[in-house]
Image (tube, rainbow, N blue to C red):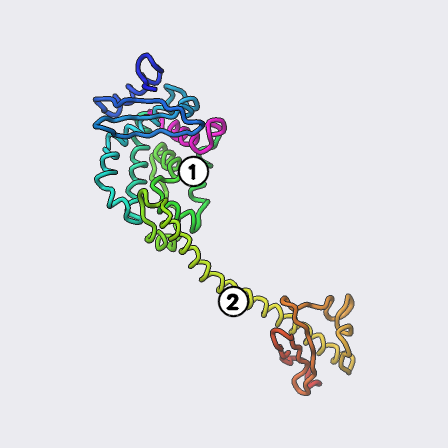
Amino acid sequence: MRVNEHQLPALHAAFRNVCGDLGVAKPPALYVLQSGGLLNAFALRFSGRDFVVVYSDFLEALGADSPEMKFILGHELGHLKSRHPLKQILLAPGLIFPLIGPAYRRAWESSCDRHGALAAGDIRAAARALLVLGGGPGHGPQLDAAAYARQHHEERGFFVTLHELTSTYPTLSRRVADMLALADGRPAPKPDRDPLAYFIALFMPGGGAQSSPANALVLVVAVGLLAAMAIPAFQKVRQSSQQKVCFNNERQLAAAFDQYLEENGKGAKSWDDITGPDKYVKTMPACPVGGTYSATYHEGSGYEVSCSVHGSYQHPKQQFGSQR
């Protein structure tokens, strides 16, 4: 549906005001499109004409002449003022380059957000419009903008970084954080990024190629390689930890045997002599991987406890000189 002074006049007047604020001498055609619940808007150039399209659910959620709607209209007009539809065609080969292409496209969106903030005349209203995109028309206006912005710095990691480096849009939490920083007159802090994600992103082309099956295959292969490197390292650490636990058990049991011999003048006959509630070891320890323990006395060196899986730990004699 084409918007004009007869169709949705309030939205038409708001759009004209935004065009004037942004210095657009010839306003493009504005259309409202039924979207089946989707919240979106876009700008395009076709057959030498510029168009701005707003989805009907977005219009219902924000209102025709609200600062939030002016932000959306200003954002889309920013694309047309910056000739992004034309650049998308002329620079198409370069936009496919990994890292560089997506970064350039994300810069478009950040620049247009600033166009929208100028058109809205209220930077915090611009942030509220972005919150509606994130939380929907019902819950979006109730979200806390500062808390939502903090997600961009708190929710980090390899896959978050990889998504940011390969996406043509900044995350909504990043866009809200940028708006709040702009409102406060301070630079937006940059979050930490996983260095490994940069390496993986080098093999993932930007632009429209980012959603291709080949690119998805690259991601699967990259995740497989990471798993192939991480799983053996994890197993090695796990095995080392289990061995240390087992050796600690052997050390306790050997010390208990030595103590029993020192106090009773004879060696223990079974595990029950040294383990129990009132004994040297309250409960019989178990090997983490199911090994069984055995004990042997060596003249001059004391007791040696051995595990059927991890081998033996010979207790170093410290104070029981009579056993040497």
In the orientation shown, which residue stands out farthest toward the front?
A: 213
The residue pinned by badge 1 equals: 149
Q: Quadrant of residue 37?
A: top left
Which of label 2 and label 1 is nearer to you? 2
Q: Is residue 59 magenta?
A: no
Q: In the image, residue 44 lies at what x, y percent?
A: 28, 30
Instruction: Give the residue drawn at x 47%, y 32%.
Output: 135
The quarter of the picture where the C terminus appears is bottom right
Q: In the image, residue 129 lies at what x, y percent?
A: 40, 28
The residue pinned by badge 2 equals: 236
Q: Is residue 137 magenta?
A: yes
Q: In the image, residue 186 lies at what x, y percent?
A: 34, 37
Q: In the image, residue 315 lies at what x, y percent?
A: 64, 78
Tell me where the magenta segment starts and ends, as one range: 120-142
**Mark 2: amino acid:** Lys
Give the answer, above or below, for where 237 lies relative to 255: above
- SS at badge 1: helix
Q: Quadrant of residue 82?
A: top left
Instruction: Give the residue drawn at x 23%, y 35%.
Output: 86
The reply, left or right, for residue 90 in relation to residue 276 is left
**Mark 1: amino acid:** Ala
